[in-house]
Image: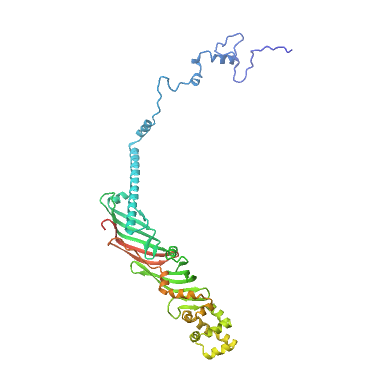
Amino acid sequence: MRTPHRISNDRIPFDGWQEESVPPEGAGPAGPAGRYASPYDELADLDDGRRGDNPLDDVLHEEPAYRDDEEWSPPDHRSRGRRRFGSLSLAVKGVVAVLVLTAFLALADRWAVLYAEHRAAQQLKKELKLTAAPEVEIEGFPFLTQLADRRVHELKVTVPDVAADRITLAKVQATAQNVRIEGDGLTDISGATVDRMRGEVLLSFADLNRELGASQVTFTGHGHNRVLARGTLPVAGHDLKVRADATIQRLGASGISTDIDNMSLAVGDLATYRPGTGADQGLHLTPKSVDRLTAETDKARRLLSIPAIVHRVGVPASAVRQAERSDAKLSELTGSPRFVKKVMGMNLIDIAADNPWLLQKLGIDPNLLDGLTKLTRPELADRLSLAFQLPKLPGDHGYVRLRDVKVEKGGIRVDLSGAGLSVGGSG
């Protein structure tokens, strides 16, 4: 059993404690200088009711946010904002007021522009008999001052589709300047008169292919004023390759004309049809077809048995008799360049009328011949024509003229100019 040890109050001084701060043995809780004999005595003294002398009272004591007898009310932030605004200088207040007023005026100006653009679009749709309202954009700021003056500096109009003869113009864009507004009040817009106008018309090749009803024919630009047409056309149940060249030029002040030339329809690699009654027009064999015809002895002799062909080719009767008896003479005759050229120059339409079997021997459908003879040059040219006239403008005042026509990669572009145009109003 361990011997109990007596706890001594003797303490060894350490840094921060002074030796004289320890009271002598047998003294009271505190010495003459008010020191405590032990730190435990000091802690016990914190709870002896003398809080007024405790330095922690101010920290640990919490005042209630409000008394029970007081009614709670939310904080007034508006009064705080008014106090802050009231503390601003007069110059700053003026700047804020001007900014707010400017914002309201700008908003009112934009609303007025939208309203005027809508009214103008609806009026143009009615006057030009359009299927959809055009796009109208009023330039210049502010608009309210222009409206008060009843005069708009600049107005842009875009019409996606305008009907003109057989085709629909892909897009019409125009910029009108110095537009006088007609109406009684500030918000009343019943019409307008345009002093000057410039614009352009674009005939897109993609739209032209669709509008002309020949979806298998494509148009491409070639040079400043030429358009190439390439594709196929159905004739008597056969799709024939078509090619033609068109020259575009201005026609008067309100239209463009199309001069179609070099029109041809290919019947495979057998023959080529060119509408018309000229010497080089009609249905003619191709060089490949003539070579195939003269290479076969039976077909060559059958060809020489037709008097109309012998007469057109200009072969002497003696040469024909020799070719009928000798294959060598036949090959010599039909293989000569002169004979091939003469055969290619024959119009098969005239010969096939009396010898319908000839087309069958060549591999050409006789019904195709009837379809080709009905396809006249004017009819084919009309199917490939790009000519148009500008639609008549509403009212009897002003004019619109075509200035320049040029062919581009995507279509035909025509410049416009006009003056004195009126829309709606009293006209």
Q: Nearer the viewer, residue 358 or 7?
A: 358
Q: Nearer the viewer, residue 231 or 354?
A: 354
Could you say where residue 235 lies in the image, as x and y percent from the top left?
47, 71
Q: How is the image coloured?
A: rainbow
Vertical placement of 388 versus 147: above or below?
Answer: below
Count of numbered labels shown in the rendering: 0
Vertical placement of 415 versus 63: above or below?
Answer: below
Residue sitting at x 59%, y 15%: 40
Seen as rendered, the residue at the extreme right is 1
Residue sitting at x 57%, y 86%: 330
Res 389 quadrant in image: bottom left
Tell me if 377 is positioned left or right of 342 in this view: left
Could you say where residue 244 lies in the image, as x and y percent from the top left?
45, 72
Could you say where residue 255 lies in the image, as x and y percent from the top left?
35, 67
Seen as rendered, the residue at the extreme top is 26
Q: Nearer the viewer, residue 119 or 325?
A: 325
Could you say where residue 111 lies in the image, as x and y percent from the top left?
34, 47
Vertical placement of 11 versus 389: above or below?
Answer: above
Q: Quadrant of the C terminus?
A: bottom left
Seen as rendered, the residue at the extreme bottom is 318
Tell me if 324 is positioned left or right of 139 in this view: right
Whether residue 382 appears in this view of the structure is yes
Q: Quadrant of the N terminus?
A: top right
Whether residue 225 appears in this view of the structure is no
Tell me if 44 is positioned left or right of 112 in this view: right
Tell me if 182 is positioned left or right of 204 in this view: left
